[in-house]
Amino acid sequence: ICEGRIVKNDRGVDKKKLIQEEAEWYYIDEKLVNYGILIPTIKFGVLIANAGIDESNADGDFILLPKNLEQTTLEIWEYLRKKHKINNVGVIVTDSRVLPLRWGMQGIGITWCGFETLKDYRGKPDLSGRILRMEQNSIIDGLSSATTVVMGEGAEQTPLATITDIPFVVFQNHPPTKEERKNMHIAKEDDFYGKMLTSVAWEKGGEGK
């Protein structure tokens, strides 16, 4: 809304086409009809529905995800640090998603600034001395899920949440590097759900070209 990313629904808007234009990748499943138009998409490297296009609380229009998301997040982070004269502050921009085989929406971090997003246990022993190989705790998504519970999904009118007393978060004095952003994502072929993700014919959307 702050970026003016609102498309007026004048009955001439093709929602399916709009989703395809906004997505990086998408695929059409004609059987997903129980809740209107529902298209699995990848946007900002995240598997979400309808490229994040939202009709909730939009008065009949379509609200799109921000266009300059990383830059906007950086500007908010720098503003807060300067205004409050503090170093240890982080910013998360969240969206909602569904998880396989579970009812209910959960928050996910779309982008961030000012802290380490993962707590890496790989190469460390567990209680029995077994060396952990895969385990990484997603700090960003855990916090995002908590804030989504507070902010709500309906008419709560709570667009922001503040998180405090989090000693396990490691703050940073620099924006996320390209390597840090890359490390947040897994190739479809290497993903736990890789067999399912690669068994459909993904098409490249407008944001993926």
Image: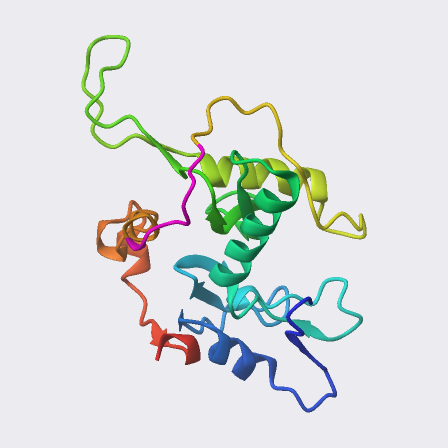
* Quadrant into which the C terminus falls: bottom left
The mark tally for this picture is: 0
Q: Quadrant of residue 192?
A: top left
Q: Is residue 183 above or below residue 171?
A: below
Q: Is residue 195 above or below residue 9?
A: above
Residue at 34% x, 52% y: name it: 181
The magenta segment: 171-178
Residue at 80% x, 51% y: name it: 157
Closer-to-camera residue (203/84): 84
Residue at 60% x, 38% y: name it: 85
Closer-to-camera residue (144/90): 90
Q: Does the segment drawn in magenta span residue 134?
A: no
Residue 51 picture location, percent across and down:
51, 67
Residue 96 picture location, percent across and down:
58, 52
Is residue 178 shown left or right of residue 85? left
Residue at 51% x, 35% y: name it: 142
